[in-house]
Image (tube, rainbow, N blue to C red):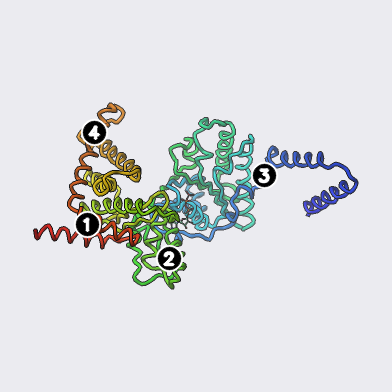
Amino acid sequence: MIKEIGVGAAGALVVVLLVLGINIMPLVFLAGLLAFLYFFVGNKTPARNFIKAGERGGSSISFSHIGGQETAKKELMEALDFVRDQKLIHKMGIRPLKGILLIGPPGTGKTLLAKAAANYTQSAFLSTSGSEFIEMYAGVGAQRVRQIFREAVKQAEKLKKNSAVIFIDEIDILGGKRGSHSSHLEYDQTLNQLLVEMDGIDGKEKIKILVIAATNRADILDPALVRPGRFDRTVNVDLPDLEGRMQILLLHTRNKPLEEKVDLKAVARETFGFSGAHLESVANEAAILAMRDASDALGEQHFSEAIEKVMMGERLERRPDEEQLWRIAVHETGHALVSEEPRPGSVSSITTTSRGRALGYMRQTPEKDSYLYTKEYLEGQMAVLLAGSKAEEMVLGNRSTGASKDFQQVVKLARQIITSGMSSLGVICMENIPGKILYESMQGLIKEQEARVEETLKNYMGIIRDIAGVLVKHEKINGDFLREKMAAVKGEARSA
Ligand code: ATP
């Protein structure tokens, strides 16, 4: 109310001064300067500016809204049971739990877990991010830390709750090792304030505060932050496994009509390495595609296209000319033919559609979730990657720049073989190996696979052009078409 009267009076004063013909510019400048000093130097930035909008109050997300992450949920719930049963805590003389650190890659559900934790403990929920505490003005970060703790108590009182959960995403921005930032005094002051606030929690307050922080860079956190008594519970939130992906897909398709033959297990199998956020996006994109197609329900083709979109990016409008399109088709056919050799059934689809930074691509179906790879597997993948440029060379007589990304990956795989002690160099320490020997060893591995690829492609020279032709015409072919063509060649070879 006072604010409104003030604004009204200021407006009226400006009008009067203008009517009297008085120059108001010095006044405007002075008012601007005062506002600046009030908000920034005086550290009066309203708390709502850095506590995320819509992220205050209680949380309606429960653990049942989170797919997979069974270990993380179990560990978190165990820790939270200490917060729920305060009487027992007092009786047993257990010190209060002040902080839980969630560690994992982006999009794996850390924010969801923090919200579910607030719900599970019947707490008020406030969310912010480490970057919100970093300002160029000294003392602002520390002031914001004090503000969020005060705000948490206020929110809990307002919602008539006994506890509050403060969620700080990207804690590494504010909780990196002290002295490591260029403007370290401001960073250090902010972190010190957080430590002071956490030390102030002694379990006797009326409103209990629990800080949940998330990061994917636990290695750079200041040791003072993770010492016992502060963030002393660590919960790993990893990328979901096959069962986890299936659960997440089930959650995100619950409100969408699915065609009967849609097999979510197959979608989960094809999305190895996807986070929960990726999977949510797959379900959403599939629904958008179904709507664009005017379909009543989401079909297999919508999911397949959605996976490609999430994996490779948006379809590009630009269309290469005929000559380039032919080269792309030959290149992708090369990849696909070699992929089928060591692992029949591995090609899911081949396309000349440009997406993201790829002009075309061949998609492989992962057999099962793999966390360890043998030398044979890595060599097989090297061969698949080398096959694109080799096909160009054998069919068109030369290579193009289209293979540079493939080669980067080939070199990475060769290095992986060497560092894992699977090359002829044996078990080595990379730092002690002279560059020349390393180079020669890598070249040896690559040349071996190039020869293997050439051998394989020679067997299919008769059909590369046919398949590439169909690909240019239809833009996309599936693995079954390719396998039929290959089987015919093998059949002919046997009967000859
Ligand atoms: P970041 O580290 O980037 O902040 P995060 O780990 O906090 O990411 P969330 O914000 O929790 O990830 O997840 C983003 C979105 O991804 C969620 O809103 C949800 O739609 C989806 N999601 C992620 N993980 C899961 C999961 N385990 N179950 C269901 N949905 C999930």
The residue sitting at 50% across, 40% down in the picture is 172
Cα–Cα gap, marks 1 and 3: 68 Å
Three-letter residue code for mark 2:
Thr
Examine the rendering and report whether any part of residue 276 can be seen: no
Taking 154 as reference, is 112 left or right?
left
Residue topped by disc 4: 441
Q: Earlier in the sequence, mark 2 or mark 3?
A: 3
Q: Which image quadrant: the C terminus? A: bottom left
Cα–Cα gap, marks 2 and 4: 49 Å
- Percent position (x, y) of residue 145? 60, 42
Taking 15 as reference, is 299 left or right?
left
| Dot in front, 1 or 3 | 1
Residue topped by disc 1: 463
| Dot in front, 2 or 3 | 2
Residue topped by disc 3: 45
- Percent position (x, y) of residue 470? 29, 60
Q: Secondary structure at mark 1?
A: helix
Q: Earlier in the sequence, mark 2 or mark 4?
A: 2
Examine the rendering and report whether any part of residue 107 can be seen: yes
Three-letter residue code for mark 1:
Ile
* Label number found at residue 253: 2
Q: Earlier in the sequence, mark 1 or mark 4?
A: 4
- Crowdedness of circle 4 by 10 Å Cα count: few (<14), some, many (20+)? some
